[in-house]
Amino acid sequence: MGSDNHSSKQSRPSAKSLSKLLRRVRKVSARQVTDRLPVISRQLQRVRYRNWVRDNAEEGQAAGSGLARPDFLIIGAPKCGTSWLMGGLGQHPNVIMLPEEIEYFSLHLDYPFAWYAEHFARQRDALKAEKRTPYLLGEKSARYCAMPIENIEHVREALPDVKLILMTRDPVSRHWAHAKKFFAKRKLFNSDQAVLTMKRRKLFTFLETMRPLGAFSNIIANWTSVFPKERLLVLSQEKALTSPQDILDAVREHLGLATNFDPGSLAFMTRRRNRGPNVPMPDDIAEFLEEMFAGERQWLRDFYGDRLFVRSPDRGLSA
């Protein structure tokens, strides 16, 4: 018993060591703190997931037939207008959208499907009094677009009837918008110019790492190798900026929703959401990205032509 008490006392940090640790924490710069925030956020999120799994271990082992499931997914891509589209669809009286990106199929397949489904059940219960039946459940997770095929197969297995929406953008401007927003989030002061303070090697490495998010030819090929082509609606972010109502009508038709919509809500649809810093692209970065995406840009031009949207990627149906 005495040895146990001794061990317990030895394991407790002393007041001196705690004071030393506190002094070290106070010396951490604002930059170091903000650089760690994304990691800390992910760690906290994982703790919440583990707690859910612990509390629901028995009932969450399998994806039962009674679980709430999304009717459609906005699969991306990041910085292509997906937040704008989510906001517009969320105003429809027959649509219930999750307010956050779950990224279940891209990041959290090690957790039970019941955990994922509970998000939809909770949102449905919170909003069903405001919505008209029948209603559709939807989710936006912008990084679904670049998942490997095995993850897409998990989507097909769990959601065999789901409909898909992909928004594209010129990959050079998409990449620059992504970099500006990413590095701005990691800086506490002068965040708008944060991307310009990065060493070029680090910035170019980031842009190369994010390349799959702008490789739309691969994204479309991968998703349509698993799902029927008619399940996927492909939209242009550039066309959405000039013809928002036409784009929203195309989405509602794809989902089987009534096309009559309150015109008053379209005032919201004329405003862009989730904007990043307004920082012009330096010439050397533009040259780097233009070389990276030369082939992809041409592919997109051929894919769209002068069409507003593409109903399915076989190029046989268009607006």
Image (spheres, rainbow, N blue to C red):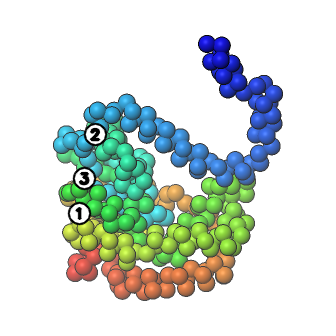
Callouts 2 and 3 close, C-beta under 8 Å: no
Residue at the image point whose x is 37% and y is 66% from the top: 148
Q: Is residue 259 visible?
A: no
- Determine which residue is flagged by label 1: 253
Q: Amino acid at mark 3?
A: Ala
Using a 10 Å C-alpha cutoff, classify the residue at mark 3 as few (fewer than 14 neighbours), some (14 to 19) or many (20 or more). Answer: some
Q: Secondary structure at mark 1?
A: helix
Amino acid found under the numbered disc labelled 1: Glu
Reading the image, the residue beneath label 2 is: 61
Marks 3,1: beta carbons within 8 A: no
> Residue 108, can we see it?
yes
- Camera-nearest label, 3 or 1: 3
Compared to residue 16, the image places residue 241 above or below, namely: below
Q: Number of callouts in the render? A: 3
Q: Quadrant of residue 143?
A: bottom left
Q: Position of residue 260 (x, y in %)?
A: 24, 57
Q: Which residue is mark 3?
A: 158
Residue plotted at (66% across, 22% down): 7
**Left-right relation of 205 to 132:** right
